Image (cartoon, rainbow, N blue to C red):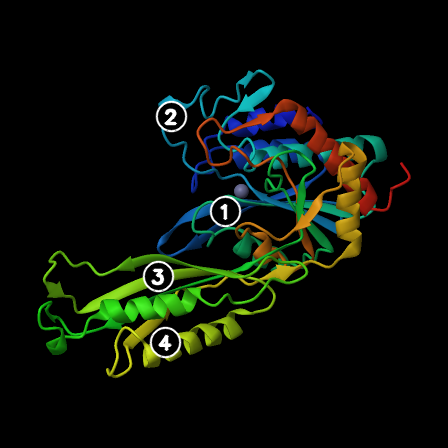
Amino acid sequence: MTAIDPVANLSALIRCPSVTPAEGGALTALEAMLKPLGFVVDRVTATEDGTPDIENLYARLGTDGPHLMFAGHTDVVPVGDEAAWTHGPFSADIADGEMYGRGAVDMKGGIACFAAAVARHVEKHGAPEGSISFLITGDEEGPAINGTTKLLEWAAAKGERWDACLVGEPTNPDQLGDMIKIGRRGSLSGTITVHGVQGHAAYPHLADSPVRGILSLTQALMDPPFDGGTDNFQPSNLEVTTIDVANTAVNVIPSKASASFNIRFNDTWDADSLKAEIIARLDRAAAESPLRPARPPVRYDLVWSERPSHVFITRNNALIASLSGAVEAVTGREPKLSTTGGTSDARFIKDFCPVVEFGLVGQTMHMVDERVAVADLETLTRIYETFISRWFGHAAD
Ligand SMILES: [Zn+2]
């Protein structure tokens, strides 16, 4: 009845086929875990033209501060080749101490454990001296338009304020206790198109090869390095992810060439200063291209992809110390405080309150045979329960 068993919680969630954008019964299953604990549950459907409607869930226990938010998603990526799974992707079968299913680690497992941790805390101490809320989206693995951002705005508009947030994404590379994420790099993408003049490959003076220009421009983006890294972040890194000419003839100089790039950047930059640096590099390379001697500057245009992700770092000691201390108390291991990896919904939450991320071991996420060690579910539940106690100031228990 109560949600104290993370294994039962997770099997209920895995059995819901909630591949984005389908709710699949997963939020209903979560609601059934939270309501008996005293949570007030809101189901919020977000809509936007051109994207599927998405069901989200916000649940709060308590009315006072301090207010701790747990954030995550019940949607999962597609199962891929279903026949290749050893156990069905929505079976929640347990074999050799591991539970199988899409979302086992990313991240129904994190939700199952946090619900269990809250249930145990309530059972031992009664309702927390403050509030705990769940902010759960069904649109993290998809376009993320009708998910966390809209749910945060919806909750903030009705007066919700939070003091801290824990995101339950799988943050550990190998073993539970490896890594807490205390920030994320930013991400910025763009596409350059170089305009040339089509012509015969034997008469290059009559044409203007855009291939020469695109090579100079992409080289300037990749070299020299943007920075050497900072105290909390690895060096910023730009990858040219595609170069396209779409030319099928070896004896024709094409008329244009394009290239796309993505840069993961640290706190040396913000999106604006980084855009300025990239444009300066491109302009310089366009003027000085050694592959086009005695030619006018390369003619190019640049289109930025919409919505860059901003870099952030969390510096809330009570939050980081409570979580880090809880991980160490339960596992005996001191977690690394990291900012590596891709972006997550934490990038939206950081505008509302300090946010950190800690969850299961990520090794099988998005793979065939996604699975979680049953023992890890118990360990993560104990970490979360200890974290809740410490954060609310019950460290003596
Ligand atoms: Zn995830």
Q: Position of residue 331 (x, y in %)?
A: 76, 33
Graded by Cα atoms within 10 Å as few (under 14), some (14 to 19) or many (20 or more), the crowding at tag 4 reads many
Q: What residue is shown at x 77% (from left), y 41% (from top)?
A: 387
Q: Position of residue 326 (x, y in %)?
A: 78, 40
- The N terminus: image quadrant: top right
* Cα gap from disc 1 to disc 3, whole angstroms: 24 Å
What SS does tag 4 mark? helix
In the picture of the structure, the residue carrying the numbered disc 3 is 260
Above or below — where is 143 with respect to 258?
above
* Cα gap from disc 2 to disc 1, whole angstroms: 22 Å
Amino acid under disc 2: Glu
Confirm or reject: label 1 Cβ below 8 Å from ligand 1: yes
Q: Which mark is residue 82?
A: 2
Of callouts 4 and 3, the N-terminal one: 3
Q: What residue is shown at x 50% (from left), y 65% (from top)?
A: 225
Q: Position of residue 273 (x, y in %)?
A: 52, 74
Amino acid under disc 3: Ser
Confirm or reject: label 3 Cβ below 8 Å from ligand 1: no
In the picture of the structure, the residue carrying the numbered disc 4 is 285
Q: Is residue 383 visible?
A: yes
